[in-house]
Image: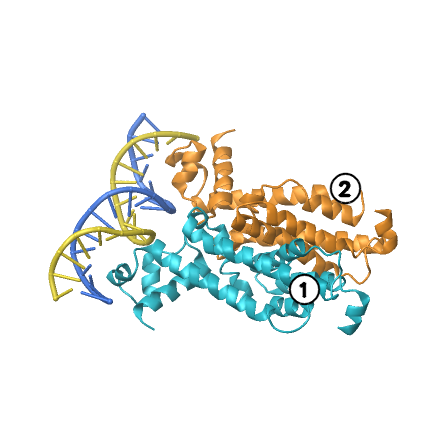
Chain colours: A cyan, B orange, C blue, D yellow
Amino acid sequence: MNTEERLIESTRALLWERGYLGTSPKAIQQRAGAGQGSMYHHFAGKHGLALTAIRRTAEELQAVAEARLSVPGTALERITAYLRRERDVLKGCPVGRLTQDPDVMADPALRAPVEDTLAWLRTRLAQVLDEGRAAGELDRRLDPPATAAAIVAVLQGGYVLARASGTTDPFDQAVSGVLALLAAHAPETARQRA
Amino acid sequence: MNTEERLIESTRALLWERGYLGTSPKAIQQRAGAGQGSMYHHFAGKHGLALTAIRRTAEELQAVAEARLSVPGTALERITAYLRRERDVLKGCPVGRLTQDPDVMADPALRAPVEDTLAWLRTRLAQVLDEGRAAGELDRRLDPPATAAAIVAVLQGGYVLARASGTTDPFDQAVSGVLALLAAHAPETARQRA
DNA sequence: GTCTATACGCAGATAGAC
DNA sequence: GTCTATCTGCGTATAGAC
């Protein structure tokens, strides 16, 4: 990995662990094993580096989610696969955490990837739910956008509860809880097939 | 309000808006209209002030939640009242946001009120759900701790989605979504009564 | 491309006068 | 109780040599 790559990856890791406010140029350089001059040669400064890092993290998250949601299977199976995928639960969501960074939210460029990623996730889940309804796997009365928002919120909130407790337990419980509620919305026939 | 009170309230506001890392002694003093010496006379420093502020915020949040959850009514009504209470949605949860502050999570004293408050909330909601089950208002198959975790997660995650989008919309959708899922777990007889 | 030198202001606190 | 110095180090760069 060249210096530029190492700088980007270090920034991604630090933004995840400490946020934008908590990440200093010096810390980035040390973690990347790069000097001061090196960093300012490749990037305009902390802001430019963070922009590159955040965009990459956002793209990666969408790609990983899409991989689980686009496999064959029922809507419920795909959503379950997405929710139960391996995660670094105690580190939290690398995109969602930026939402708490006032300097990120105040800067339109830094904020855009965060806004876009979470909006995309809700839309994509609503699509999957809608497909499930169309296929008769889910109750027609279920509201896809609202349910999708609830599911994404359970994830983001699950991270918060896990970090507060210091264990992954509340995250797993929240996911199980919402999946159980959702499963009850499969009509009898679909539930028996499952 | 005396100087000490103003310092505490300023700290509470700043912790909410900018987190612990993003809050400097100078900013606290300016907002409180107090001088440097004044702050260090009343408190040992940023840490001590934050400790007082966080404890107060945590207590207040529990009191407000308990007020909604302890009124007469069915479990579903009380949980709905709690979820739909007025909130500063775009500011986020003043307790949950501290979960993203590495310096708070690394300090046992600062962290304890955060951990305790969110743990208490889950337990309290599980109790209410259990009462609902016992009263025949909710499906016996519903798992109170998991469902409670999901509900608290929807709140915490709803804040995240709202902040990302810049509108309260996803928060309201997530709340509606989870309440709709939950309502379907009321047995027919209870649903008809409602 | 990378290094070292230099700069200015803020973070976070201590000391002692009033 | 509050004020004004004073202090050390870090955050965030810029400049220019190699």
**Horizontal side, residue C1 vs residue A32: left or right:** left
Relative to residue B76, is residue A152 drawn left or right? left
Helix, strand or loop at label 2? It is: loop
What residue sits 70% from the left and 54% below the top? A143
- Closer to the observer: label 2 or label 1? 1
**Image-quadrant location for residue B148:** bottom right
Q: Is residue B36 left or right of residue A184?
A: left
Q: Residues within 10 Å of mark 2 (few under 14, many from 20)?
A: few
Q: CA distance from mark 2 to mark 1?
A: 40 Å
Q: Amino acid at mark 2?
A: Val
Residue B52 x/y as whole percent:
52, 43
- What amino acid is at disc 1? Glu
The quarter of the picture where residue A19 lies is: bottom left
Residue occupying the point 64% across, 74% down = A72
Secondary structure of the residue carrying tag 1 is helix
Tell which subunit mark 1 falls on. A
Tell me whether marks 2 and 1 sit on the same chain: no
> Is B63 rendered above or below residue A109?
above
Determine which residue is flagged by label 2: B71
Task: Tell which of B75 and B98 is nearer to you.
Answer: B75
Reading the image, the residue beneath label 1 is A131
Q: How far across and how far down the image is residue B123, in percent?
A: 70, 55
